[in-house]
Amino acid sequence: MIPWIIVIVALVLIDQVSKLMVSNLMEYGQCIPLIDGVLNLRYELNPGIAMGMLSELPPSMRWVIIVIPLIAIGAMLVYLWKFRPNSIWACLGISMIAAGGIGNLIDRIFYGEKLFFGQVIDFIDFCAFPEIWKYVFNFADA
């Protein structure tokens, strides 16, 4: 379990540092082309979950997008700790998913005007196929 905690902590740190860099070095809504017509850095905020789902939740229901990920992350950590899968790939995959959930959960809890009313910082804009994929995401999502 210890090596997987190190993986999780490292990935959460990379996620949080990348989001801090974007929020400190870019203006909200700013777009910087990296590979013309393929990949941009675009600073956006997502009040919901994946691909903007649940972004229209009323404030009284915001707990849903905090509690459900907490339960899922807890289940993944218990699984890694208790059952110790034999496959390094399974452990790595579970660790990466847990780290992504933790990174976005940190945003939802702390990056808002009020505690627990935050928005997730997104900045990776894969724009090569806009009719198929129009969403902006972050390191944790990847």
Image (spheres, rainbow, N blue to C red):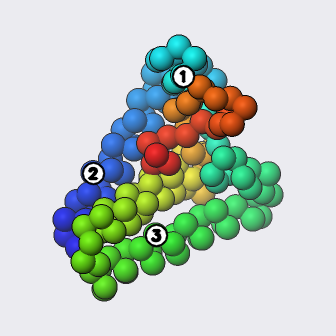
Q: x, y (%) of residue 131?
A: 72, 32
Q: x, y (%) of residue 111?
A: 54, 45
Q: Is residue 59 left or right of residue 1?
A: right
In the foreground, 33 or 62? 33
For the N terminus, the image quarter is: bottom left
In the foreground, 133 or 77? 133
Q: x, y (%) of residue 85?
A: 29, 78
Asked if 80 appears above or below 110 in the picture, the reply is: below
* Residue 12 visible in image: yes
Asked if 9 appears above or below 71 in the picture, the reply is: above
Label 3 residue SS: helix
Residue drawn at x 52%, y 32% as measured from the top left: 124
Residue drawn at x 64%, y 53% as measured from the top left: 49
* Residue 106 visible in image: no
Residue 112, label in figure: none
Residue type (three-letter) at the residue carrying disc 1: Val
Q: Is residue 90 left or right of residue 29?
A: left
Residue 73, label in figure: 3
In space, the residues marked 1 and 3 are separated at their CA atoms by 32 Å
Residue type (three-letter) at the residue carrying disc 2: Ala
In the foreground, 85 or 139? 85
Label 1 residue SS: loop
Circle 3 crowding by C-alpha within 10 Å: few under 14, some 14–19, many from 20? many
Q: Report the residue marked by disc 2.
A: 10
Residue type (three-letter) at the residue carrying disc 3: Ile
In space, the residues marked 1 and 2 are separated at their CA atoms by 28 Å
**Residue found at the very far bottom of the displayed protein:** 82
**Mark nearer the N terminus (1 vs 2):** 2
**Do residues under tags 1 and 2 come within 8 Å of each other at their CB atoms?**
no
Circle 1 crowding by C-alpha within 10 Å: few under 14, some 14–19, many from 20? few
Q: In this view, does 51 lie to the left or right of 10?
A: right
Q: Report the residue marked by disc 1.
A: 38
